[in-house]
Image (cartoon, rainbow, N blue to C red):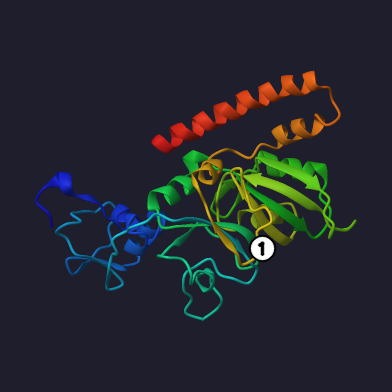
Amino acid sequence: MANSESSRTRLNKLIADSGLASRRQADRLIEEGHVTVNGKRVFELGVRVDPKTDKVLVDGKPLRKQTQKLYMLFNKPIGVLTTMEDPMDRPTIADYLDKVPGRVFPVGRLDWNSEGLLLLTNDGDFANKVMHPSQEVTKTYMVKINGQARPDQIQKLLRGVSIIGGRATAKSIEKIRRPEGSDKYDWYKVIITEGKNRQIRQMFAKIGFDVQKLQRVAIGRLRIGSLKKGELVYLNDAAIEKIFLNDDPEELKIKKSLKGRSDAAKKKTAKKISKRAMAARQAAAESRKK
């Protein structure tokens, strides 16, 4: 490999920078033996290589040089896999990306039976930042369960439960009414910061309920809005910034409570919200610099 230590970079970072995968996904590719360096298969994480002199192949193909960084929001339908290819030839998100000018990958995932907001990018550092637990990026879901939960059961989810993959806690759970709802089956708006596999389904299973419908509607304050299923939009800098601003249900309640109040009361509350928003933006900006 290379002689100069300063010219070397971590193998997972090199793969992520090429736009092939996030760093976490790159680690998985290395561990599973998909990566070779100068003809030798590499399994160890933390290996450093020189991009100029070392020949790195993934599944026998050289890494592409990344040109333009892409950031997109996709509304994933039910019955579509969050992967770029499937050996069983089932529908995947790649089926919707034929017009994207470059290779991208999903940031995190949504289950086959789940739908909603999914981020796509070719920026490995960005993907790693969104998914890293230290960032505590909020993910907001609309959840329909097969029954009606008691308040003490919901409190249990707010305190935290043990699931496969560790302990999981909901940051916020709010019972809501939906046009397609009923008196027998409850809908909840659930906000989490973790990203464990099938986390929300496992959490509700711990209190005795199956999740009948699961839709992700926001990551941070970036919301899916009126984007139709199967459609995608490109994100600008302002939209990307919203991802790192935590969804705050209390702030929304304050704004709703202002309806019909005097202008003076609105201005006073607006100043408080503005200060909180400014602090959140500064924290988000600092986290991106790290």
Seen as rendered, the residue at the extreme right is 183
Query: Where does residue 108 sit, x and y in percent of width and height?
Result: 51, 56
Name the residue located 67 percent from the left edge and 39 percent from the top edge: 159
Name the residue located 81 percent from the left edge and 48 percent from the top edge: 176
Seen as rendered, the residue at the extreme left is 3
Q: Quadrant of residue 252?
A: top right
123 and 82: which is toward the camera: 123
Query: Where does residue 220 sit, x and y in percent of width and height?
Result: 59, 43
Q: For the N terminus, give its image quadrant.
A: bottom left
Query: Where does residue 187 sit, x and y in percent of width and height?
Result: 79, 53
Q: Which amino acid type is marked by label 1? A: Lys
Give left or right: position of 242 versus 288: right
Name the residue located 72 percent from the left edge and 53 percent from the top edge: 142
Name the residue located 53 percent from the left edge and 66 percent from the top edge: 82
Q: Quadrant of residue 24?
A: bottom left
Pointer 1 residue: 228
Q: Can you say whether 6 is above or below 105 in the image?
A: above
Seen as rendered, the residue at the extreme front is 263
Q: Quadrant of residue 276?
A: top right
Q: Can you say whether 204 is above or below 172 in the image?
A: below
Helix, strand or loop at mark 1: loop
Q: Can you say whether 190 is above or below 73 in the image?
A: above
